[in-house]
Image (cartoon, coloured by chain):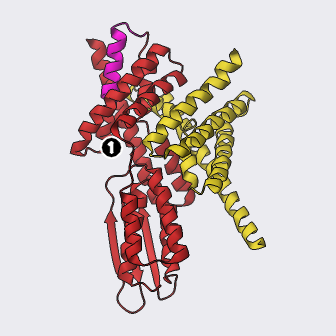
Chain colours: A red, B yellow
Amino acid sequence: MEITAKELLYITSRIGSMLITCGAEIYRVEDSLYRIAAAYGFSGGEKRIEVFAIPASLIITVNDGDSPPLTQTVRISARGTNLDRVDKLNNLSRYICAETPEIREIRKHIDEINGRKVYGGTVRLFSYGIVGAVFSLFFGGTCSDALFSGIISMIVFGVSKFVNKVKPSVFFQSLIGSVIIASLSVFVSKLGLTESFDKIIIGASMNLVPGVTLTNCMRDFIAGDFLAGMYTLTEAILVALGMAVGAASAIALVSMI
Amino acid sequence: MDILKEMILPCVYSFIASIAFGVQFNIRFRHMLAAGIGAALTQLIFTGFEMSGLGQMICYFFAASAVSVYAELMARRLHVPVNMYLVIGIIPLVPGGNMYNTMISLVGGDIDSFSHLFAEAVGIAGSIAMGVFAVSAIMRLIRMITKQAV
């Protein structure tokens, strides 16, 4: 199946940007796009494709040998983790490599993946609560610590959903989250409901803490994507700093009351 | 009683927490059980290595390698990306609490414990990443050899 450079640019940029948005690893994104292009004959020499991806943007240049090269950049502003979509996109790119279908069909598949359901608000709310409660137990908290940690995590989820409407930076998201966590935890322990507040804070913070981000950044570094690694490392450090500033100032202020 | 408290309970916590994280990462329901078992297994292996008195970083390395093998095998069997089981499986290991303590000591002005904890957090993340990478490189090699043999 023959395909024009423009069509190839369209499908690779859509699939690539969706993969990055859903939290796929950068080297996997580049690898998938090169494979898709190779399946349509853009595998090197005159007809080739160049892909450069970092977590914030995707640059693709398609060269078909006759006309001037075509380039598209996609700016990626919001990223999350949606492993279900990554799975389906991987299946799609494997299918494209095996069957080289028409572009109309690929577009239909991409739209289908885009419309796949995500978990609803209530389920997510409870997942935040469970993470908070369980990690509070994990770090040696008592049952009442776990209970309050779960409740506070749910409150943070509700508030952050509201705050995210103004699209704050990751630093402010974590700052606001940890201010809520720390002030409520200190308040609860002031009321005498629990003995200490640090186990509540550490449990509820687990929803915000960038542990997975830090590990992913190390994986980027080892894979050789230094720019992507630096980007995620900076993000992880900023999120952690936001949490620390928020928690420390909230503890200091609420303890004074 | 002691063994229950030190080995089994953390596994149960990891199992529940990783399933809850699975919801946040949008994993379909049918993959959740396997991913949760992976996380519990990781925790069990990690506690086992830690009790045997090995160094901290090497424990993380071995536990991450073990969960990578599990993720590779499950991904092969169920035809999903390895990352799906890996991201959930390493949740008990990732230095979340460590990062938190690091930053708290920074804001508190305690530079000594900040530099200590920060180096530890980066070291843990690096060990996990290396464990994951070693396994995926070996798996790629095995796949290449078996493909050529056929």
Q: Which residues are magenta?
A: A176-194
* Picture residue at 56% right of the left edge, 55% below the top: B80
Residue B134 visible? The answer is: no
Q: Is residue A180 left or right of residue A84?
A: left
Dot 1 surroundings within 10 Å: few (below 14), some, or many (20 or more)? Answer: some
Depth order, front residue of A147/A164: A147
Q: Residue A123: where, in percent of width, then height?
A: 39, 36
Callout 1 amino acid: Val
On-image quarter of the C terminus of chain A: top left
Chief secondary structure of the magenta portion: helix
Location of residue A238 with respect to B15 vertically, above or below: below
Q: Residue A110: where, in percent of width, then height?
A: 39, 65
Q: Is residue B130 left or right of residue B26?
A: right
* Picture residue at 51% right of the left edge, 87% below the top: A45
Q: Is residue A179 magenta?
A: yes
Q: Which picture quadrant has residue A16? A: bottom left
Which element carries disc 1, helix, strand or loop?
helix
Residue A158 visible? The answer is: yes
Q: What residue would you read off at disc 1?
A: A170
Location of residue A150 with respect to A45 vertically, above or below: above
Location of residue A41 with respect to A83 vertically, above or below: below
Q: Residue A196: where, in percent of width, then height?
A: 43, 13
Q: Is residue A141 magenta?
A: no
**Outermost residue to the top:** A192
* Picture residue at 46% right of the left edge, 45% below the top: A213
Q: Residue A164: where, in percent of width, then height?
A: 26, 42
**Outermost residue to the bottom:** A66
Q: Is residue B89 left or right of residue A100?
A: right
**Outermost residue to the left:** A166
